[in-house]
Amino acid sequence: MPKKKGKKKGGKKAKAKVEGAEDIVQSLLKCYERNCTLTDSQMCPGIKNALRECKENETVLNRFILEPEPVEKPGDMPVLLEPLLAAFRQERYIYITFLHLWGYPMSYENAATLGLLLEKGCYPFKCIELEDCLLEPYSVYRLARSFNHCSILTTINLDYNEFGDEGCKNLCKGLEGNTTMLSVSMCYCDLTVESGKYLGGLISSTAVRDLFVDGNNLECDGLLEIIKTCVEQAKYEAARRAEEALRKEQEELEKAAKEKEGKYKSGGETSGDEGKDKEKKKKKKKGKKKEKEPAAPPPVGPWIHKLHIADNGIDGLVYGKEFAPLMMTRTLQELIRFSDCFEELDLEDNLIGDLAAREILEALEYRKEHEKLGGVKLRTTHRLNADTFNSIVKLGSGLKKKKKKGKKVRIMHDML
C-alpha cells in the first residue's frame, strides 16, 4: 500500500500548478463568501484558510474538507454545505477530486444537491467521504444513483451513518452496473446478517474489490454471503493454474526430447541454424520500441483484494451457533489458499476460537508453500493459543492497527 500522507483541515494543495490558478481560486473564494452571505451562514474556516494558502502559492485546491462549527451563541451562524456546492457550479470549478464531509448532518436536499453535481460528469471526483453525516436510507439511494455518472470515482466512504440494512441495500442497488468504483467503506453503519447478501452481490457484479465494514453485526453468515462467490472463482482459477503448470511441464519434456534427437544432426547444420538465430535476434533488437499501453480498466467480477470485517460478532457465543466460526473459516480458508488477488483480511475483535484460528494458519501456510502466491496481511484477535497467534502474526504481518477515538473508530483510508 502507498504511504499515507498527512492532511490539513479544509484541504490539500495540488502539486501541479495550473495556469491562472490565483484568479481561479480567488473567484471561487469570493463566490463561496457571497453564497454564505445570501444564506446567513459562515464559510468553513478550514476551507477558507486552505483557499487563501493556495492563492498565495498560485496552486488550485483539489481536496475539500468541510466540518460544522458549533453554534453556541444567538448570533453564531452555521456552516452549510449548499453555498460550497453552489460555488463549484457557478465557477465551474473542475479541479476538485476529493470531498470530505465530517460530522455534517445531511438532509435529503443536501444529498440531492450533491447528487446533481456528480451527475454533471465534468467534476473529476475520485473520492467522496461522508462520515457521521446522519444519512438516511433514501438519501443513500439518491447519492448512489449518481455514482455511475462519475467516470473516475473510485472510493466512497460512508462510515458512522447508521442507515442499517436498508441503506446498504440502497447503496448496492444504486451501484448496479458500476465499472469504476473500487473501494466501499461502511464501518459502524448498523449492518446485520441481511446486508451480507447485498454486499456479496456488490462484490460479484461490480468492480468493487476493497470492502471495509468494521464495527457492524454481520456475524458468520453475513461473512459467508460476502465471500462465497469469490471462493468459487478462486477455486476455478486455481484449477486453471494447475492445468497450465501441467501443460508447461509437458511442453518442456517434449522440448527436451527434441533437443536430444537434434544432437545427432551434423555440426554444420547446427552452426548454420545458430547463425540464422543470431541474425533474427539482431533484427529484433533494431525494431522500434513498443509504446506503453494504457492501463486496462478494473475487472468486473467476484474478486476481492481487501476485506476488513473487524468487530462483527463473528464468534460462537450465540446459542446454537457454537461451531459457526469453524464452518465459516473452512470457506474463508479456501479464499486464503487459492485467491491470487487477496491481499488483506482484518478479523480483529472477533472471538473466532483456537480451532478456527488453526484453520486460518494452515491456509496461510498452504498459500505460501503449495500455491506460491503472495502473502496476505492478516489480523485476528489476540485471545488465541499463543503459538497459533504468533504463527499467524509471523505469516500475516503488515496490517497496521487503527487509531481509536472515543467510542468510534475514525478510519482514514489512503485515497491517493
Image (cartoon, rainbow, N blue to C red):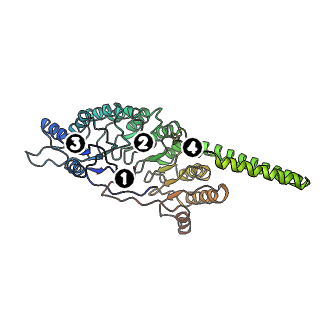
Q: Tell me, yes or no, if residue 319 can be seen here.
A: no
Compare marks 2 and 4 and give the one earlier in the sequence. Answer: 2
Q: Which mark is residue 154?
A: 2
The image shows residue 237 at horizontal and vertical percentages of 64, 44
The image shows residue 384 at horizontal and vertical percentages of 51, 64
Q: Which residue lies under the disc numbered 1?
A: 412
Residue type of the residue flagged with mark 1: Met
Compare marks 4 and 1 and give the one earlier in the sequence. Answer: 4
Q: In this view, does 250 lie above or below 150?
A: below
Q: Tell me, yes or no, if residue 179 can be seen here.
A: yes
**How many residues crowd mark 3 within 10 Å: few (<14), some (14–19), many (20+)?**
some
Q: Which residue lies under the disc numbered 4?
A: 230
Report how far apart the C-alphas of labels 2 and 3 lie in the structure: 30 Å
Left or right side of 136 for 374: right
Report how far apart the C-alphas of labels 1 and 2 lie in the structure: 15 Å
Residue type of the residue flagged with mark 3: Asp
Q: Which residue lies under the disc numbered 3?
A: 23
Asked if marks 1 and 2 touch (Cβ < 8 Å), the reply is no
Foreground mark, 2 or 4?
Answer: 2
The image shows residue 154 at horizontal and vertical percentages of 42, 42
Foreground mark, 4 or 3?
Answer: 3
Report how far apart the C-alphas of labels 1 and 3 lie in the structure: 32 Å
Q: Is mark 4 on a helix, strand or loop?
A: helix
Asked if marks 4 and 1 touch (Cβ < 8 Å), the reply is no
Residue type of the residue flagged with mark 2: Thr
Residue at the image position 48 percent from the left and 57 percent from the top = 351
